[in-house]
Image (cartoon, rainbow, N blue to C red):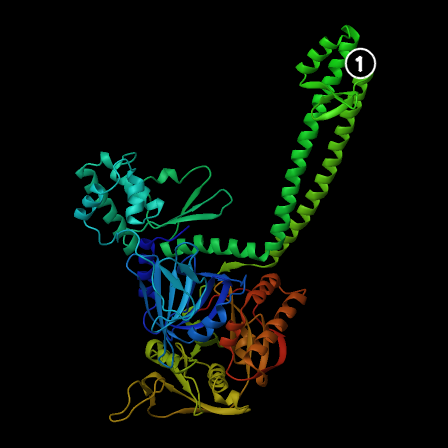
Amino acid sequence: MELSGLELRYIVNQLTDSLKSGYYVSSINSVTKNSFLFKLHHPTDKELILMISTQGIWLTKLKFQSLEESALLDKFRRELERSKIDSIEQIDNERIVVIKFRSLEDKQNILILEFFRDGNLILCDNELQIISILNPVEVRHRTLKIGLRYSPPPSRGIDVANVDLESLMSLRENAQRDLDVSRWIGRTMSLPKKFVEEIVHSSNVENKKIVDLSDSDVSSIYKSLKDLVINVSSGANHTPIVVSGMAGTDLEAFPILPTNFSKFSTDENSIKRVSSYMEALDQVLSNTIINRGKSAQTGEIDKQVASLEHDIAEQDRAKELVILKASEIRALAAALMSYSHHQSTDSKSLENLLTSMSASIISSKGIKYIKVAEELVLLEANIAKTASSLFGRAKEMERGGLSINDAKDRLQQKINRLKNQADSIHRKHNFVKQQREREWYERYRWFISSDGFLAIGGRDASSNSAIIRKYLTEQDLVFHAEVHGSPFFIIKNGRASSPQSTLLQVAQATVSYSRAWKDGLSSADSYWVTSEQVKKGAPSGQYLPKGSFVIEGKRNYIKGNEIRLAAGIMPIHNKYSFVCGPVEAVRKRSILYVALLPGGYDPMEISKKIRIELYHSATEAKDVNDNEELAAYLKSISYDEIIMALPGGRSKISQIRWGEAKVLDDLES
């Protein structure tokens, strides 16, 4: 499936609405050499995953494994990570998308995506000088390579979004008179076949040529075109469907239900409705990327299989030829044997028989042979003896056919082994899976206390601000510490009845997620206040930094909180989540956990150790329910997800334990 300019208009509109101010690129990973996942973070809104590929650009709900390294990855990471997205635009109605990024240092970079021919990804500076390019271009009308200024290709066709009826009438007059209407629309509008067919079908001009088009027909085409443009680009009347083939492979995505629906709903194809066209694109285009990625993983094996299959085809042809020759020789032998018993042996009648059997007598150095099926057999004076020699030659060739079968079987065994090897690679690697839908609080620090209260805390100044401004209610309690880098934590609905154990756990989380962890302290003090004590504005004449608030009134101190946390796997809402928080809370709510102390390993190293230790514990257990699912989750969890939950600085594992959670519990909040 190739995206048209019209579909790109819808995608750009959707992305512009979704990626509102504040989204920045937190990480970039390659899926294939020409497909990349941009993880987008926002201080208050949910994280998004943007697929940028030569196939297209879309928001994905899928989680991909890297299938190929890309030469562009390092440059993308260096220039675009931590940058905010300024804008996403389409050049006219062309299949070109321009994304502008702005770094923390206010440096602008521009990523240009071209979706025609083989596609291209071009990274430029703010003056459109090319920094990096996937596929350098050198053609008559433009040259694209590092160091040169980017220039778009010449426009193709008219802009379907801006064409008017008068222009369409004029285009008809200047068109080739015997041209099919379908081909005229496709060439003139630069529309894909599926949209051309929709316009032609809904306009009732199927099978017409330009010479047959009346003014009324052109008006009907114009109306169908404008309806299509509005429906596809705006998303207002979308009834998105995905067309799948017999093997269940997603082949095509439609934003609207075609009027010639029955054409696509056949015995070979199945059609399913989806909730949005972006979801349809995610299914179809992601499927294309995965198939290409799989081919890249097993490319050498596929080449060997193709070569062996070619050899088998040659063996089949050789066998067919041998069988055909043996059949002709055996038929001639039978005819000669009958001839020797019933006919006179004069040369004329023998020649007539041979001619009728597509055979002949030839002489070589004074010796006569019978030539049949390109084979030579000595012509004996005794015709019966000659027939016997022919029978013998046919048997030899038939035995040769059996040896060809043996050789073919050996080749097929090699093919089966190689295919099993490729299948094993595909089974071993789960190339793509559904991205887990996250709860709103998973954007922040969070845990469930041993008493069942939800506590959420900020990761940085922006999320501190979001927690207080967006989620704090009069029923909540607010925690903070007089330690540099202390987050704000709130206990949701905890004002009326928070037990002492919950207060102590949130106090411990508040100091443990502060600078105290990085500084290697063993304990620190924190305090809690009610929601109305937190003032969101600065006093007159003063300035509050982002993420800071004024606390009024009495502070309820909890002193000597131990700097210590635990990280574990918590079942919630029929799925697993990785959670980090106070040891007692994590022990109560998790199936399996590790206790952590400051010092030791950097975040990446400790994240690897945590995953390995938890995975080994889950796989070695013999008496834990559902440990296969738990092990599968631990195998799939990303290091980024673990790092995001851990405190800043170095950490070490002090112990590994099974928690008290045994089943998938629902959070009551």
Secondary structure at badge 1 equals: helix
Is residue 506 visible from the viewing direction of this image?
Answer: yes
Observer-nearest of 380 and 105: 380
Q: Measured from the top left, where is residue 324 in percent x and y?
A: 68, 26
Is residue 235 visible from the viewing direction of this image?
Answer: no
Question: Where, by quadrant of the figure, is residue 186 drawn?
Answer: top left
- Give me the residue at 69% from left, 32% from top: 319
Report the side of 162 relative to 478 (left or right).
left
Question: Where, by quadrant of the figure, is residue 380 drawn?
Answer: top right
Observer-nearest of 46 and 28: 28
Report the side of 290 relative to 1 (left or right).
right
Q: Quadrant of the C terminus?
A: bottom left
Looking at the picture, does residue 317 appear above or below residue 464?
Answer: above
- Give me the residue at 73% from left, 11% from top: 350
Looking at the picture, does residue 336 appear above or below residue 592?
Answer: above
Q: Amino acid at mark 1?
A: Ile
Report the side of 379 relative to 138 (left or right).
right
Judging by the rendered image, the residue that carries numbered circle 1 is: 383
- Give me the residue at 25% from left, 94% from top: 541
**Crowding near the residue tagged with mark 1, few <14, some 14–19, many ≥20 C-alpha atoms within 10 Å:** some
Report the side of 109 relative to 618 (left or right).
left
